[in-house]
């Protein structure tokens, strides 16, 4: 308990400025009933859930603990890798291989007296509604869109209009390189993560013909080596992204091709980045975004100032450090055709009326408005394609090669789509056929 011996002397001082804020009346407090002690007490009793104990999560846990929250819970299924240590500052070399949630919780508990952090070393999908119902606030520091969509759907579905306690504000932070965002969602009341899905469009894939015939960028040469040359030459039985020998092979192939087309910039680390689809993690971006998220948590919990996400107000703050520094805060509007919080079917443009069902199924993964990797599809009258169970898959597989027309799908018709990643949600889409060019 070395740390406990170091810190007691500074304990009262540590909370002095925090208490100045939360024990004084603010613009949102009702002067007749305001009691600063009650506010502080409520914050301490509040159960707050943090999802993710990585780059953002470490920052969020530290900030929340220093903001006066005392009952914090954290979920993360990952273990610590040596490459995390440059920014996930709650971890040390001796922690490599241990669970992130576990180590982060113990570290913050040691450093901030009186804070209890309960770690869960598992997936968010391992818990049900009853588990999530116990929290008053959820803060996400995730790097996966799928996990965000899952927890968003869970929190929206949990809302019971009769029970005030069933509304759990969701604060979501995200970063990508020098860019990031912080947003607040009041489930069913304001725009949800699914409403905002098109803000996170999957990166445009480079057409295969560009890779094969006229590469313009170093990345194209690497993708060419990765997708085309590897398949043709099969230098090793199976590509292992973590095997330096394999990456070296791709790098040299890409380099030769780049020289052929007079393209510069192919390096070993770029090859590694493209192949593993790595986005550089910037510690400073994480701390900016985590700070914004935790300020919102503090404001929601204490009512000391207006927070993001009040109905009709701004709910989305974007930050970019790409070109100097820029932030912009705006209101993202709730969508009536949101598959999670709306009730209208969303329009789904069919590029080519001659499409087969297989082309439609494959298109779901890359459509910014859908992003579903394993969709099962049914029309109003029949099941068109099911990914599971195996027997049903086999039975519906012949449909994949039929055209939409042959299956009786016409303009304006509604289809229902489900995906194993979102067990509770059925996505409703309304087909809109683009007219074939004359
Ligand atoms: Zn929505």
Image (spheres, rainbow, N blue to C red):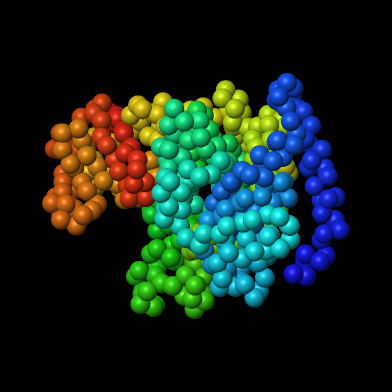
Q: Quadrant of the C terminus?
A: top left
Q: Quadrant of the N terminus?
A: bottom right
Residue 51: tell me if it is visible: yes
Image-based side of 122 in relation to 180, left or right: left
Pinpoint residue 102: horizontal percent, then vertical percent.
Answer: 58, 64
Residue 213: tell me if it is visible: no
Pinpoint residue 343: horizontal percent, then vertical percent.
Answer: 36, 27
Pinpoint residue 392: horizontal percent, then vertical percent.
Answer: 16, 52
Residue in front for this viewpoint, 246 or 327: 327
Q: Is residue 242 above or below residue 351?
A: below
Image-based side of 49 in relation to 324, left or right: left
Pinpoint residue 55: horizontal percent, then vertical percent.
Answer: 62, 57
Q: Quadrant of residue 426?
A: top left
Residue in front for this viewpoint, 263 or 62: 62
Q: Quadrant of residue 330?
A: top right
Image-based side of 249 in relation to 94, left or right: left
Image-based side of 362 in relation to 288, left or right: left
Residue in front for this viewpoint, 139 or 240: 139
Residue ID at (67%, 41%): 43
Residue ID at (31%, 33%): 429
Q: Is residue 154 above or below residue 236?
A: above
The single residue placed furthest to the top in the displayed view is 32
Residue ID at (63%, 44%): 45
Residue in front for this viewpoint, 6 or 399: 6
Residue ID at (15%, 56%): 391
């Amino acid at each position: 308990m070395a740390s406990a011996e170091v810190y007691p002397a500074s304990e009262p001082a540590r909370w002095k400025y925090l208490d100045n804020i939360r024990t004084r009346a603010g613009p949102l407090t009702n002067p007749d009933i305001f009691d600063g002690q009650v506010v502080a007490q409520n914050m301490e009793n509040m159960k707050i859930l943090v999802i993710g104990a990585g780059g953002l999560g470490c920052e969020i846990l530290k900030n929340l603990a220093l903001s006066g929250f005392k009952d914090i819970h954290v979920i993360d299924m990952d273990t610590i890798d040596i490459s995390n240590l440059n920014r996930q500052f709650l971890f040390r070399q001796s922690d490599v291989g241990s669970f992130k949630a576990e180590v982060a919780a113990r570290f913050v508990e040691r450093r901030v007296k009186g804070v209890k952090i309960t770690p869960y070393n598992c997936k968010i999908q391992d818990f049900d509604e009853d588990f999530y119902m116990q929290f008053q606030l959820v803060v996400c520091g995730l790097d996966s869109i799928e996990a965000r969509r899952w927890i968003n759907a869970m929190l929206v579905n949990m809302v019971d209009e009769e029970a005030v306690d069933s509304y759990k504000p969701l604060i979501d932070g995200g970063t990508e390189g020098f860019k990031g965002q912080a947003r607040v969602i009041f489930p069913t009341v304001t725009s949800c993560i699914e409403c905002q899905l098109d803000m996170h469009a999957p990166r445009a894939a480079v057409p295969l013909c560009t890779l094969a015939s006229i590469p313009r960028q170093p990345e194209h040469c690497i993708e060419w080596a990765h997708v085309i040359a590897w398949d043709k030459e099969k230098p090793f039985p199976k590509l292992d992204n973590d095997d330096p020998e394999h990456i070296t092979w791709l790098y040299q192939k890409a380099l030769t091709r780049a020289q052929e087309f007079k393209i510069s910039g192919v390096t070993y680390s770029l090859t590694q980045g493209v192949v593993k689809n790595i986005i550089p993690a910037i510690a400073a971006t994480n701390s900016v975004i985590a700070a914004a998220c935790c300020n919102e948590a503090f404001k929601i919990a204490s009512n000391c100032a207006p927070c993001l996400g009040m109905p009709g107000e701004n709910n989305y703050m974007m930050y970019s450090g790409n070109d100097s520094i820029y932030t912009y805060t705006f209101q993202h509007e709730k969508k009536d055709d949101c598959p999670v919080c709306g009730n209208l079917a969303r329009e789904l443009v069919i590029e080519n009326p001659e499409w087969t069902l297989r082309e439609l199924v494959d298109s779901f993964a890359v459509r910014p408005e859908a992003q579903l990797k394993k969709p099962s599809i049914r029309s109003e009258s029949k099941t068109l394609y099911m990914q599971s169970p195996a027997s049903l898959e086999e039975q519906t597989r012949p449909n994949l090669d039929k055209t939409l027309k042959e299956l009786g799908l016409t303009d304006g018709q509604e289809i229902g789509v489900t995906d194993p990643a979102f067990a509770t949600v059925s996505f409703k889409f309304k087909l809109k056929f683009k007219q074939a060019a004359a």
